[in-house]
Amino acid sequence: MALLQSSTLPPAQPAYVLRGHNAQIHSVCFVRHNTRLLTGDAEGWLVLWNLATKRPVAVWRGHSAAVLALSTWPDDRLITHGRDGKLRVWQLKHSDEPTFSVVLPIEDSVTPRHEPWLLHTISVNTLNFCAFSACKASPSEAAQLFPEANDTALLVAVPGDREGDIDVYSLPSKLRLTTVCAPKTVKLGMAMCVKIMIHTSKLVLIAGYEGGDCCVWRFDQGTWTLLSSTKSHSQPILSLDAAKSLDRYYTSAADATIASYSLADLTACRPVKAMETKHSGQQALHVRSDDRIFATAGWDGCVRVYSAKTLRELAVLKWHKQGCYALAFADLFPEDAQTPVDDRVGSDQEQASTTLQTVGERRKTKAQTTHWIAAGSKDGKVSLWDIY
């Protein structure tokens, strides 16, 4: 679909709407190279959807409180972060899906369901709604950064016990490796969002705070150094993400400002560009995998799509009647996308079987290669949009 809508055209409509949750959606995540979508709600329920059929393949209650964030590591492991103070790693293989309940929370929110195998649990601070951020580390990178943690494969950043601090854990060891201490020269308030990543062979952490400040640290020789502290927002920062190929990172907040900052010069104390959008309360900011666009989920129920280079608003996707809190992009280049199976000449039974297989493969391929945006709302529904 075209992103720019003429005033004479009807508003864009979602390609699909997934209805299954009783409570508001707090997090969505594409997994297994776009073949599945994982959704989490305010009551701790998790639903894994088959994107080819748009039906659930696994339903369970992973947390006793709201699900703050979701991720995958690798394809058969799912990471969930709940406001119950638990960060959990589940193993859910494709071959295990038939063993799980598909009764949705909207149909029955009382009966316990069979859960995936729980591999790891880390108790973390969840006094606020700050979601975790994860960063994959190669064996050489992990050994160089944290020699004492010889089995580190994933670095996880979460709010610390003291206001403004950020703790960094390792998986699978579950060790707390280090703590990033908030600067004492300015009152930042609570950490609202965090991003940990390896940039130019250095470990970098970016955090957005309750006071509207954004701080950047770099880890070198066992020490965190504060590179910059920038106040681009008048209200709490709600989310942030990075476009590495553009050397940019972005923040959105409870105010109406969206700001872009330089990754090439992390010491810069002012944004590259700040734009007044006139739409307050944009959160769940995510950059698409090709770094061309990013999108936000709005308290007004709108998903807004922006140019990653210019911050120009490209589209407003309006369907939900209530506020949107969660958003995710599908990966544009899934590794396991398959081409449809060719028709083959044979008996009637063989041709019928081949036709069915072709339809199934085509459906799977379409789901994997569609440029999905998934938006989760306070209404408990998840809308799927197909954009360029």
Image (cartoon, rainbow, N blue to C red):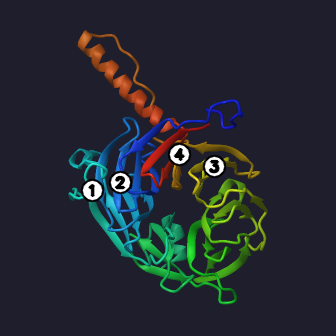
Q: Are marks 2 and 1 in contact (CB under 8 Å)?
A: yes
- Name the residue furthest bottom: 184
Q: Is label 4 or label 3 in front?
A: 3
- Give the mark, 3 or 2, whose residue is nearer the N terminus: 2
Q: Secondary structure at mark 1?
A: loop
* Label 3 sits on residue: 304
Residue 300, position as x, y percentages in the image: 59, 54
Res 93 seen here = yes
Left or right position of 52 against 235: left
Residue type indicated by callout 1: Ser
- Give the mark, 3 or 1, whose residue is nearer the N terminus: 1
Residue type indicated by callout 2: Asn
- Give the mark, 2 or 1, whose residue is nearer the N terminus: 2
Q: Distance from label 4 to label 3 (Cα)?
A: 18 Å
Hey, which quadrant is residue 149 in on the image?
bottom left
Residue 363, position as x, y percentages in the image: 41, 30
Hey, which quadrant is residue 63 in on the image?
bottom left
Q: Distance from label 2 to label 1 (Cα)?
A: 8 Å
Q: Distance from label 4 to label 1 (Cα)?
A: 31 Å
* Label 4 sits on residue: 331
Residue 265, position as x, y percentages in the image: 76, 68
Q: Distance from label 3 to label 2 (Cα)?
A: 25 Å
**Mark 1 burial class by Cα count in 10 Å: few <14, some 14-19, many 20+:** some
